Image (cartoon, rainbow, N blue to C red):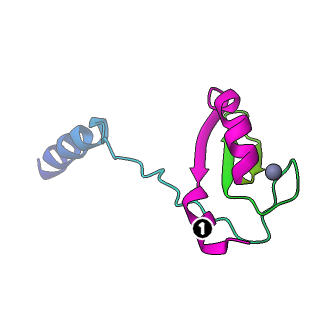
Amino acid sequence: MLVTVLSTVYGKLGNRKEVVPVMTTLSPSPLTASDRCDRCGAQAYVRVTLTSGGELLFCGHHARKHLPALESLASHIQDETERMDENAN
Ligand SMILES: [Zn+2]
């Protein structure tokens, strides 16, 4: 009797579809002085993650130049150009 009840309860639990929110929010690592623009080698302030899985780094100048064309290909754009003033050269 008890076994029957338990198996019924566990059977229902087993059939229940648990909707667990999946946290996929990866906090991207900040760009550092060792990250260099793919075009000119200057310090990179923008990281473009492509939907294809690739990754591109741009300085402020080349980010402004290439981002409009890349936005449709990018899955994520990490823009740290506001930090450029801190490291003005
Ligand atoms: Zn550049």
Nearer to us in this view, 89 or 49: 89
Nearer to us in this view, 8 or 59: 59
| Residue 40 left/right relative to 70 | right
Amino acid type for the residue under numbered disc 1: Asp
Q: Residues within 10 Å of mark 1 (few under 14, many from 20)?
A: few
Q: How many marks?
A: 1
Is the CB of the residue bearing disc 1 within 8 angstroms of ligand 1? no
* Residue under the image location 22 percent in, 38 percent down: 12
Q: Is residue 80 visible?
A: no
Q: Position of residue 2 (x, y in %)?
A: 12, 52
* Residue under the image location 23 percent in, 44 percent down: 7
Q: Which residues are magenta?
A: 60-89
Q: Position of residue 37 (x, y in %)?
A: 81, 54
| Residue 55 left/right relative to 13 | right
**In the depicted structure, whether residue 19 falls above or below residue 84:** above
Q: Position of residue 14 (x, y in %)?
A: 30, 41
To which quarter of the image does residue 17 belong? top left
- Does the magenta segment cover residue 78? yes
| Residue 85 left/right relative to 20 | right
Task: Give the quadrant of the C terminus.
Answer: bottom right
To which quarter of the image does residue 73 belong? top right
Q: Position of residue 27 (x, y in %)?
A: 52, 61
Q: Is residue 89 visible?
A: yes
In the rendered image, the residue lying farthest to the front is 89
Secondary structure at numbered mark 1 = helix
Q: Tell me the residue that label 1 is attached to.
A: 85
- Does the magenta segment cover residue 11? no
- Magenta region, main secondary structure: helix
